[in-house]
Image: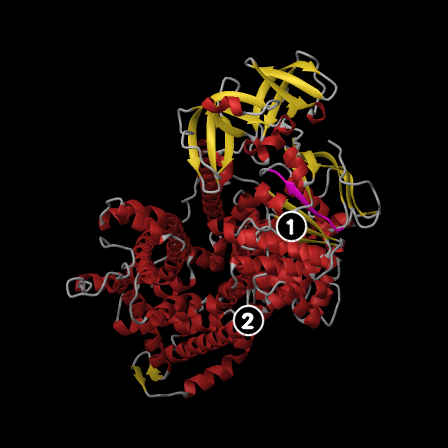
Amino acid sequence: MRWIRRNVVVVAGLLTLAYMILPNLVVMVFSFNKPKGRFNYEWQTFSLDAWKDPCGVADLCGSLTLSFQIAVWATIGATVLGTMIAFALVRYRFRARGAINSLIFLPMAMPEVVMAASLLTLFLNMGAELGFWTVLIAHIMFCLSFVVTAVKARVMSMDPKLEEAARDLYAGPVQTFVRVTLPIAAPGIAAGALLAFALSFDDFIITNFNAGSSVTFPMFVWGSAQRGTPVQINVIGTAMFAIAVLMVIGGQLVGSRRKKAATP
Amino acid sequence: MTETASTDRGGDDVRLTGISKSYGSFHAVKPLDLTVPEGSFFALLGASGCGKTTTLRMIAGLEDPTTGSVFLGDKDVTGLPPHKRPVNTVFQSYALFPHLDIYENVAFGLRRRGIKSVKKQVGDMLDLVQLGDFAKRKPHQLSGGQQQRVAVARALINHPKVLLLDEPLGALDLKLRRQMQLELKRIQTEVGITFVHVTHDQEEAMTMADTVAVMNAGRVEQLGAPAELYENPQTTFVANFLGTSNLIEADVAEKTGDEVVVTSAGVKLRLPADRLTTQVPDGGRLLVGVRPEKISLGHADDEGSIPAGRNRITGRIVDSSFIGVSTQYVIDSPVCAELEVYAQNIERDGRLVPGAEVVLHWNPAHTFGLDAAQDIDAGVKTVDEEGA
Amino acid sequence: MTTTAAPPAPATPPVTDATVRKVPRRKRLVPYWLLLPGILWLVVFFALPMVYQASTSVQTGSLEEGFKVTWHFQTYWDALQEYYPHFVRSLLYAGTATVLCLLLGYPLAYLIAFKAGRWRNLLLVLVIAPFFTSFLIRTLAWKTILADDGAVVGALDTLRVLDVTSWLGWTADDRVLATPMAVVCGLTYNFLPFMILPLYTSLERIDGRLHEAAGDLYAKPATTFRKVTVPLSMPGIVSGTLLTFIPASGDYVNAELLGSTDTKMVGSVIQSQFLRVLDYPTAAALSFILMAVVLVVVTVYIRRSGTEDLV
């Protein structure tokens, strides 16, 4: 009885975690399925077919490449623009700060479908051709605010005395920025960039409105949910999951080894 | 060490019996018996990591002892969680609730015990710590000293049997710390509650406490009144940690009824037999100690004017630093390379400058003898520890 | 970005003609140059579209003849009348999912912040890990988990839970898929990390000694939680609920994939009006109403919870 009372939080927390992980496990298991019919929702027999031929479905790998390209460019664009804004917000005084803060906050406080629909009206009114460029524009737009938030948090926690110390030690403005400011802000910028990449790569709603006839990976999955889900989707999902988890674990190992090396 | 500050007379003494705490193979507190008499101001003194805070937390119930029991009066409270113990703590850096104002912080304990009308008590308590005008402020709007007083008020309002203070003055600057030491002492005298105070500052412990327990590496090295600890250290750790001691390695030459004569590098020194903490046979080794301020310093030319019967050592001044009320000398002598002498600045002898040959002499009654089988430098403060 | 990134040093020397120097114009403009491209981007591709959408919502016409602004506010009224149930559903589902996220997420965030010890990093990775697989694939997996002849539905049926939920109208005919319960389950699942991470951040900042202090001052563990932990984690609760409620209210993926025509949310309607029916004015009006409703709900919520300085 006492054990239960003491560990009720642990049990509840782990149950939540199970709820969050369960679908990933299902995706993984069903990547080895050999479904009857077009939909991969029921377990039939074990098979490695999909793993042997991940691009075996028309347009699947094309959509993956497109998603990847858009995510890379959107990350670069949003990170550069967002970092500049973040530095301006933290380090300078200027007019209309309140308005600018709201303009950055609002995209995060807006249901995606609203932004998607309004952006589409703009493109329609301007007669823009929907496709790669309109999707990229949209992705940079909604990733921007998240990058600003991530970088701002880091720069704000940074001691301005460090920069004064650098200047005191004969570093010019450029050197101060490159040798001191940027390295210290780097974790924030990296976090913002990672977030932007994840948001862009996985975005569906805004992309669906503004992609025209281009098909990104989430749109491919959406379409297949109507027409029939190939096992290869699960293969891609599982592979991405495995790669990402391995990268995180690798990063942790390197980090802890460095820490060990630093403390004799 | 199993010592008690007083014989058991029940009441509301805090009694620890055989209490210990281990984390895996690390023994933070080794089995320990300790009695804190009711109404006393008791200090646990030691360097960081000596187990003093762990001991305090076991009394508070924030840490479960690995072995042993905690008694409040006759009641065994070992198994009681903190919220059921009539004990309150003033936490290191205070742990004031940032989302509550000062009034609600102080009222917190009363409200938890279901007391409805807290207004008068909180008001009185805030007056006691002289913060009556700050009731509606949030903790972060107060200075360090004020926060400290809120923390004391928040604990005291519950009339605990024991008030535990975990380095309560550690976050304050030196001047404020001196002020708060007197303030805490005043409050303790006023309310008459038992205070158990953890600190690494020997001066703080000696100023405030009736009884000090010096802890080292998980055990109590020595326990007693501040003057007793200072004058009669039982171990090299206590001798060095409380103030400064000159420790000289010596051989026992002869023992008479109430006096022991030792020799070190051909110099004869005498000390009272009752100030010897160990039994040493003739020819055995001993550490002879004397506090720097007990030693008088004279120029070698004046040796003839030193009264007979005093311990004397010749040497040469290596260094001297003038610090206002006194001058501190470092002297190189055959018995010890770095003897420290503090001389009051009453009539300064102009000849006592570095390089001068001098004679050190002191009353043999001020000499104490320690077991030679210990680290002679135990408890010496290094630059690193001072910074910590 | 070759300029000093430090604030100008305060001018302390005595003010004489020789020492008064204006900050060079070039330097004064630095923040504006830094802001310009990003802010311009947001103005053109976020703010301006809102204006276009507002104008579209009061247009009339047809796809063939083109649309014209005729200040036809009737569209709003018509849209509200026709799609009123979808709005109610959206807010209801999103609200329920938000509450569920809070109830499920808080123990996990608490566990990671205070009880995980050396497992903390691993647990954090596990919370974020699902993100690495496209959320659409993971949402589809719920079709398998909640399948009619699956273990979950079987268990719920045996335990007679489905009888209760059917009576409440959450499920129907001994199935979970294609019912409100499935949609809320999907929404909860998809937005849980957005609840847990801010909760964790604000819990992790709480000084552990505050819990000890509360216990020392006679608070039972439950009281400590209520009087100390919850108030101090309020910033996390507020941002977590916002990060869950806002996207959930506009979501149509879960409703479309896990629900039926009876569970459609307002996002579905906007999407189909825009992309299939091509009735732009109605779609724009709906989208505008949704935006207004969300902004009102969020503003009221932030005011009520007294954490305005959060934004």
Please tell me how many numbered marks the rendered image carries. Answer: 2
Disc 1, SS: strand
- List the residue tagged with mark 1: B165
Q: Which coloring applies here?
A: secondary structure
Q: Is residue C149 left or right of residue B115?
A: left
Q: Is residue C21 left or right of residue B289?
A: left
- List the residue tagged with mark 2: C305
Q: Nearer the viewer, mark 2 or mark 1?
A: 1
Main secondary-structure element of the magenta-colored stretch: strand
Give the amino acid at mark 1: Leu
Q: Is residue A201 left or right of residue C140?
A: left
Q: Residues within 10 Å of mark 1 (few under 14, many from 20)?
A: many
In the image, is residue B44 part of the stretch drawn in magenta?
A: yes
Q: Residue at x 42, y 63 (%)?
A: A205
Q: Is residue B2 above or below residue A161?
A: above
Residue B25 image position (x, y, % from top left): 65, 30
Foreground of the two, B82 or B161: B161
Q: Chain of mark 2?
A: C
Residues drawn in magenta: B39-46
